[in-house]
Image: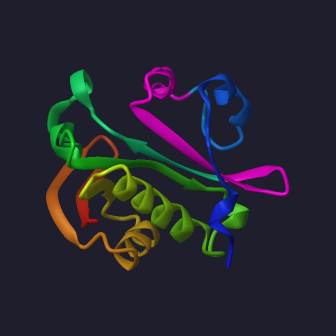
Amino acid sequence: MKNPDKIIQLQPEHYNKYGNLFDLGHPHASIWYEQIKARNRIRFLYVENGDYFAQADIVKDYGERNIGDETDYTILGRRVYLSRLFVQADKRRQGIGSIMVNYICETACKWGYSEISLGVNIDNTAARSLYEKNGFNTVIYCGEDKHGKYEKLLKYL
């Protein structure tokens, strides 16, 4: 099993250094960067032998970025949002995803939050299984967007 002490917090000045994990050309990349600078989005990276294999974000507040049905992903002082969990394809099925999810949940709890939410596409059975295995068992919303049908899941910390 991988060691959670290999998880580091991304500092804003290093944002462009980790393009192998996330698409810097993504339409929302500049929004995410601004959120990271403002410390509203905290990005964690899984490091092993100097390489970065996974990422996961905690979003504290959608604030003015509440778009459509995204308003309940966060509740100030109570609920944060687990966003952008990604493990490189060649490192999947090695427990890194669970380590990242558990680390994010433990961190949110230490910060005083009592709930954490996330969104998952209905047809993404691997991700859904990972989240359910790690305690995201309450469905708080079912919807559909341009990427397909999805659910918002909640875990009480």
User: Does 124 sit left or right of 86 as displayed?
Assistant: left
User: Does 74 sit left or right of 85 as displayed?
Assistant: left
Q: Which quadrant holds the N terminus? A: bottom right
User: Residue 32 or 127: which is nearer the viewer?
Assistant: 32
Rendered residue at 24%/57% (across/down): 115
106 over 148 or under it: above or below: below
Rendered residue at 66%/61% (across/down): 5
102 over 15 or under it: above or below: below
Rendered residue at 37%/53% (across/down): 108
76 over 31 or under it: above or below: below
- Residue 21, by quadrant, is top right
- Residue 116, by quadrant, is bottom left
Per the image, is 32 magenta? yes
Image location (x, y in percent) of residue 44? 57, 47
Q: Which quadrant holds the C terminus? A: bottom left
Rendered residue at 44%/55% (across/down): 107
User: What range is drawn magenta here?
Assistant: 26-53
Per the image, is 47 magenta? yes
Image location (x, y in percent) of residue 146? 30, 40
User: Residue 88 or 42: which is nearer the viewer?
Assistant: 42
Image location (x, y in percent) of residue 83? 41, 47
Image location (x, y in percent) of residue 42? 48, 39
